[in-house]
């Protein structure tokens, strides 16, 4: 079966490195860390007291003050990033067919801040149920997709995807397939996450999943370094405009690159730990290559899941070696989480944007904070340590893996 081709015609992003795509990309290629002491709550008593927050974000600069109070931070992020992406793609309410544009967004957790605050306020009272009438509509995970569709009057397929840290990648894959099957002409996709709160940080601390390097936050996220001690929590939103190729050409849209395929798999192993041999990671990369109809030698760059956890980084590199064999040593590999932290359900889309920009500009962003080689990792692999590298990037693959054993990846390549 011949599928329709899908291209990327617009992008938007709010990240710990900047509140536009260009600011984000400049931070990446210059090796900037987004980690700093937490400002959103008093973290003095927490084991981890730093994170990669979105900085200088004031929702009322983009939303009506009254409206902003009704929307959780993760949805605010999604709305602002969608505004950027729609404008970037040249899409307005006057030049679109709203019935042929859908919204598919991912989030791993959704409105955790709203949930936490409402329940804590209730617990402080006398037991009388006094809740904000917007409690549920602010919190539910699908509401970001709903808010984006209402803001831009988009009446095509509209729903949310959740698969933990793979959520926005799975959303992108759904977007690709909706366009391939002719269910829409354009899909607004990606995801958002904002859970830097007492519940978010405390919960991940209880799992012993996060770095506790409070004396040096900027160097705490160190994928592939021998002394890595867990991930750094981040928050972000990324939005891509995916468009069926002939539709994009007909309206004279600029085309950034082609998104040629995606894959999904399960570890079926453990609720939080990866399969020790990277079996699910291996299967998802093979599935993406097959879907994209590419060979292993077509891939030049892999933006890895690379969270800076002791087990995860080893398992993923084993999978890369299993899939790519000798070609592994010709690849550039990097984890941009060394700079953004782990943005959970939004990680996939902002890392896909990193791949898109890498394909556009033939630059591979680095894995920063490398100090000590890990003897468990193959020293012949090019992890792009500490400094961006120039090379031709015809095709790039982005990996995302989530708690529950969810794995997803997408592949982008130069448009010809």
Image: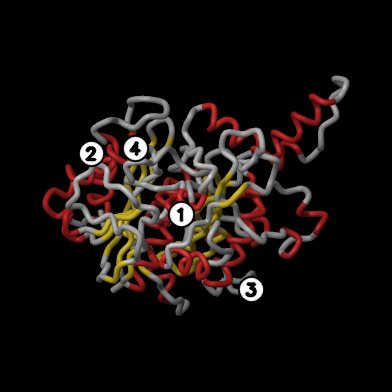
Name the residue located 53 percent from the left edge and 32 percent from the top edge.
204
Q: Which residue is mark 3?
A: 94
Label whose residue precedes the other's in the sequence (4 or 1): 4
Closer to the eye: label 2 or 3: 2
Label number found at residue 376: 2
At numbered mark 3, what does the secondary structure look like: helix, strand or loop? Answer: loop
The residue that disc 4 covers is 312
Instruction: State the CA–CA distance, disc 1 to disc 2.
Output: 29 Å
**Disc 1 vs disc 2: Cβ atoms closer than 8 Å?**
no
Quarter assignment of residue 321:
top left
Which one is earlier in the sequence, the residue at label 3 or at label 1? Answer: 3
Towards the viewer: 117 or 162: 117
Q: Which residue is mark 1?
A: 349
Q: Residue at x 34, y 64 (%)?
A: 387
- Residue at horizontal 54 percent and vertical 42 percent from the top: 214
Percent x, y for residue 82?
59, 61
Identify the secondary structure beneath mark 4.
helix
Q: Residues within 10 Å of mark 3 (few under 14, many from 20)?
A: few
Of the two numbered discs 4 and 1 in the rendering, the one whose residue sits closer to the viewer = 4
Mark 1 Cα within 10 Å, few/some/many (few <14, many 20+)? many
Alpha carbons under labels 3 and 1: distance apart? 27 Å
User: Residue lying farthest top?
Assistant: 127
Horizontal and vertical percent position of residue 56: 66, 61
Judged by depth in the image, the label closer to the viewer, 4 or 3, is 4
Taking the view exactly as shown, the residue that stands out farthest to the left is 326
* Towards the viewer: 371 or 93: 371
Label 1 vs label 2, nearer the camera: 2
Up-down relation of residue 219 to residue 363 (above or below): above
């Amino acid at each position: 079966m011949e599928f329709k081709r899908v291209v990327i015609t617009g992008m938007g992003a709010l990240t710990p490195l900047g509140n536009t795509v260009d600011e984000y990309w400049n931070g990446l290629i210059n090796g900037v860390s987004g980690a700093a002491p937490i400002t959103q709550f008093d973290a003095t008593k927490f084991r981890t007291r730093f994170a990669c927050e979105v900085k200088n974000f004031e929702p009322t600069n983009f939303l009506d003050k009254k409206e902003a109070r009704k929307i959780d931070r993760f949805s605010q992020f999604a709305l602002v990033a969608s505004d950027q992406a729609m404008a970037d793609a040249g899409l307005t309410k006057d030049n679109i067919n709203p019935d042929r544009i859908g919204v598919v967004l991912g989030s791993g957790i959704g409105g955790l801040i709203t949930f936490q605050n409402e329940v804590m306020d209730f617990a402080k009272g006398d037991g009388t149920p006094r809740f904000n009438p917007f409690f549920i509509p602010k919190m539910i995970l699908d509401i970001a997709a709903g808010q984006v569709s209402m803001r831009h009057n988009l009446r095509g397929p509209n729903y949310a995807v959740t698969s933990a840290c793979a959520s926005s990648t799975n959303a992108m894959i759904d977007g690709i397939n909706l366009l391939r099957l002719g269910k829409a002409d354009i899909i607004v996709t990606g995801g958002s996450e904002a859970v830097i709160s007492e519940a978010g940080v405390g919960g991940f601390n209880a799992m012993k999943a996060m770095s506790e390097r409070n004396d040096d936050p900027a160097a705490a996220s160190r994928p592939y370094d021998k002394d890595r001690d867990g991930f750094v929590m981040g928050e972000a939103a990324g939005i891509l405009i995916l468009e069926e190729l002939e539709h994009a050409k007909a309206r004279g849209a600029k085309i950034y690159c082609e998104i040629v395929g995606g894959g999904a798999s399960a570890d079926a192993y453990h609720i939080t730990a990866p399969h020790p041999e990277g079996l699910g990671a291996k299967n998802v990369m093979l599935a993406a290559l097959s879907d994209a109809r590419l060979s292993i030698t077509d891939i030049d760059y892999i933006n890895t899941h690379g969270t800076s956890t002791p087990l995860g980084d080893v398992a993923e590199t084993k999978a890369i070696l299993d899939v790519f064999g000798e070609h592994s040593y010709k690849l550039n590999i990097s984890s941009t989480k060394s700079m953004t932290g782990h943005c959970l359900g939004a990680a996939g889309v902002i890392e896909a944007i990193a791949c898109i920009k890498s394909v556009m500009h033939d630059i591979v962003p680095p894995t920063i904070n490398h100090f000590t080689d890990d003897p468990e990792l193959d020293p012949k692999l090019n992890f792009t340590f500490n400094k961006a590298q120039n090379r031709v990037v015809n095709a790039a693959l982005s990996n995302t893996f989530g708690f529950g054993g969810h794995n997803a990846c997408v592949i982008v390549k130069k448009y010809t």
